[in-house]
């Protein structure tokens, strides 16, 4: 009698900085007979290497990671491993984050309030080539529209965090001081803020950074 061959399992890498949450996710996903967690990392600057080494079918990716934001590594992940589908799983359910993630090539976006069974189902769905998005966030994203900030305006706002002097920001971004001031002024106007600190806070709350 021929032995029955078990169907291949979907390979998963988890990127999550909170140790307890990461352990819970890997443990619970490991209980699913058709899923196999082949790696986990706690920093954003470890994600691309982990994906390159393990070549998972699905990457479960948090946004707020030390080293690099999850949103910033999606493009590199897909270039390093085109067969990997990315699911964002985050505490921060913001329409701006959803739009940026999907524009970068993610195929799923869930919030951590959802039960782990939903995540397992989402992993199977994106591994099969479909998309899974939290419906409430999807509706919010449609209403909110795209971010009004340009790439440079976002970079300047991020560089302004902590009240960095204009000259220091200009050096870091390889721009002139006058150009930095222009980008800051534009970002402040687009966020309807009174100063750069308010503009930075507003952009973060909208998920534009």
Image (cartoon, helix red, strand yellow):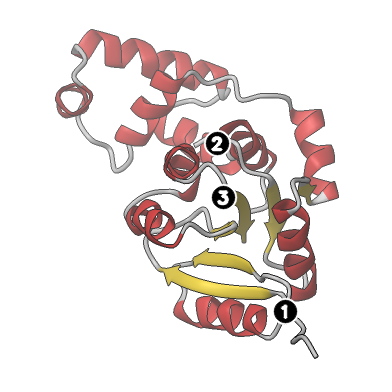
Residue under the image location 52 percent in, 66 percent down: 14
Q: Secondary structure at mark 2?
A: helix
Residue under the image location 29 percent in, 43 percent down: 162
Foreground disc of the pair 3, 2: 3
Residue 5 figure quarter: bottom right
Q: Report x, y in % for residue 89.
A: 63, 59
Q: Earlier in the sequence, mark 1 or mark 2?
A: 1
The circle on residue 6 is: 1
Q: Residues within 10 Å of mark 3 (few under 14, many from 20)?
A: many
The circle on residue 202 is: 2
Q: Residue most toward the front?
A: 1
Tell me how far mark 3 sits from mark 1, CA to CA.
Answer: 22 Å
Task: Using residue 133 as the reference point, say whether residue 179 is left or right of it.
Answer: left
Tell me how far mark 3 sits from mark 2, CA to CA.
Answer: 33 Å
144 or 19: nearer the viewer: 19
Residue under the image location 45 percent in, 71 percent down: 40
Tell me how far mark 1 sits from mark 2, CA to CA.
Answer: 51 Å
Q: Report x, y in % for residue 12.
A: 57, 66
The circle on residue 127 is: none
Q: Secondary structure at mark 1?
A: loop
Q: Report x, y in % for residue 57.
A: 59, 57
Q: Secondary structure at mark 3?
A: loop
Q: Earlier in the sequence, mark 3 or mark 1?
A: 1
Residue 116 figure quarter: bottom right
Residue 144 figure quarter: top right
Q: Earlier in the sequence, mark 3 or mark 2?
A: 3
- In what quadrant of the picture does the N terminus appear? bottom right
67 or 159: nearer the viewer: 67
Determine which residue is flagged by label 3. Answer: 84
Give above or below for 201 relative to 85: above
Tag 3–tag 2 contact (CB < 8 Å): no
């Amino acid at each position: 009698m021929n032995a029955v061959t078990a169907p291949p399992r979907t390979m998963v890498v988890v990127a999550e900085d909170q140790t307890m949450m990461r352990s819970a996710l890997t443990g619970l996903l490991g209980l699913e007979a058709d899923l196999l967690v082949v790696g986990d990392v706690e920093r954003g600057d470890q994600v691309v290497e982990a994906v390159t080494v393990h070549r998972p079918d699905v990457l479960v990716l948090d946004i707020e990671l030390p080293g690099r934001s999850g949103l910033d590594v999606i493009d590199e992940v897909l270039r390093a491993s085109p067969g990997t589908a990315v699911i964002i799983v985050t505490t921060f359910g913001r329409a701006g984050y959803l739009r940026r993630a999907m524009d970068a090539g993610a195929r799923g976006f869930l919030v951590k309030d959802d039960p782990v069974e939903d995540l397992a189902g989402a992993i199977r769905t994106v591994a099969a080539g479909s998309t899974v998005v939290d419906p409430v966030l999807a509706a919010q994203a449609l209403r909110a529209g795209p971010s009004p900030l340009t790439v440079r305006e976002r970079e300047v706002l991020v560089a302004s965090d902590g009240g960095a002097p204009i000259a220091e920001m200009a050096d870091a971004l390889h721009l002139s001081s006058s150009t930095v001031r222009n980008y800051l002024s534009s970002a402040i106007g687009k966020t309807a803020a009174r100063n750069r600190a308010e503009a930075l806070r507003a952009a973060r709350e909208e998920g534009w950074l």
